[in-house]
Image (tube, helix red, strand yellow):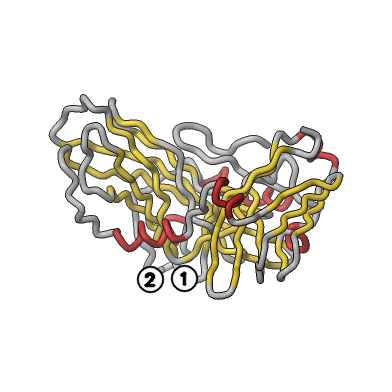
Amino acid sequence: MGQCAKGGVLFPAMIRSMKILCIAIATLGLSTLGASAFAGPFSTEPDGNELVGVELVLEEGALTPGRTAHLGVMFHIEPDWHIYWRNAGDTGLPPSIKLELPDGVSAGEVQWPVPTWYEHAGLLDFVFDEEVTLIIPLSVAPDFKADRVNINAAIDWLVCKESCLPGGANVSINVPVGEPLNSSHAAASFEATRIRLPQPPANAATAGIIMSWDGRRLQIDVPRAQRIRFFSYEPAKAPPVEPIRDAQSQGAPLHIEYDSRIDNAAQVAGVLEVQRVGVIEFFTVTIPGPRK
């Protein structure tokens, strides 16, 4: 299906057949954007805007010419509900973010923490609950001049429990230009995200992780691992045949089966969660497709 909700800083919708209902629901509501609201007591049935609150926070407190700042998009989610990772999994849709930045400020790639592995009714989703902060690096030009600037964002999401509801908000933050203030009230949220950011591919090689193909079966070996889980970045074009069965392993190598769609894949990439005695680590892993 390509992408849902195009424009700005957006994230591919990883869709399998079970997502059709969610997409239909989202299409009815994503055009209605409300002000940022935090979940609370409901006098009637809640909607997607009541179930999720969103705000922008600048970690450094100010934009400094010639330096990189870090914008946090903080989601506050009503208990028992969840939103989705960049690859939603079998159901749901990931959030989309469209930034409006002043001239001289540009956004880098979104930094997504590793999500929760969520199995339900034979399906596998990758979700966030309670609270999550997505981090977006902002590059500030050396000659950037202003006293204060606005950073604006149009944000859409799908929030689910037994049912799925669309939500959206236009949010903004006004920040000074100058030296960093280092007074972000969201410091703990930034730290919680960074703890769950995957390490770069070079670290996976250093950790002894080996990926190889046997036909259309991808094998991932990890020394001394007690548990391994694979969170694929791109399942829509070539998903694993049985992700719940294949994309996790207790102590043994992973053997992930793909069908013929994998033949045209340039690569397979994602996050590997490795649990060893007393430690859990996350690694970005990538391998060319089996026919490359």
* Residue 93 picture location, percent across and down: 58, 49
* 142 horizontally vs 262: left or right: left
- Label 2 crowding class (10 Å Cα cut-off): few <14, some 14-19, many 20+? few
* 50 horizontally vs 274: left or right: left
Helix, strand or loop for disc 2:
loop
Q: Quadrant of the N terminus?
A: top right
* Residue 111 picture location, percent across and down: 45, 47
* Amino acid identity at mark 2: Pro
Q: Quadrant of the C terminus?
A: top right
Which residue is drawn at the image coordinates 77% and 60% (left, top)? 246
* Residue 240 picture location, percent across and down: 76, 51
Name the residue beneath numbered marker 2: 41
* 108 horizontally vs 69: left or right: right
Which residue is drawn at the image coordinates 29% and 43% (left, top)? 172
Which residue is drawn at the image coordinates 17% and 27% (left, top)? 145
- Label 1 crowding class (10 Å Cα cut-off): few <14, some 14-19, many 20+? few
* Amino acid identity at mark 1: Pro
Q: Nearer the viewer, residue 54 or 255?
A: 255
Q: Quadrant of residue 119?
A: bottom right
Q: Which mark is residue 79?
A: 1
* Residue 19 picture location, percent across and down: 67, 50
Going from the N terminus, do you reach mark 1 or mark 2 first? 2
Q: Nearer the viewer, residue 282 or 126?
A: 282
Helix, strand or loop for disc 1:
loop
Q: Quadrant of residue 2?
A: top right
Which residue is drawn at the image coordinates 55% and 58% (left, top)? 282
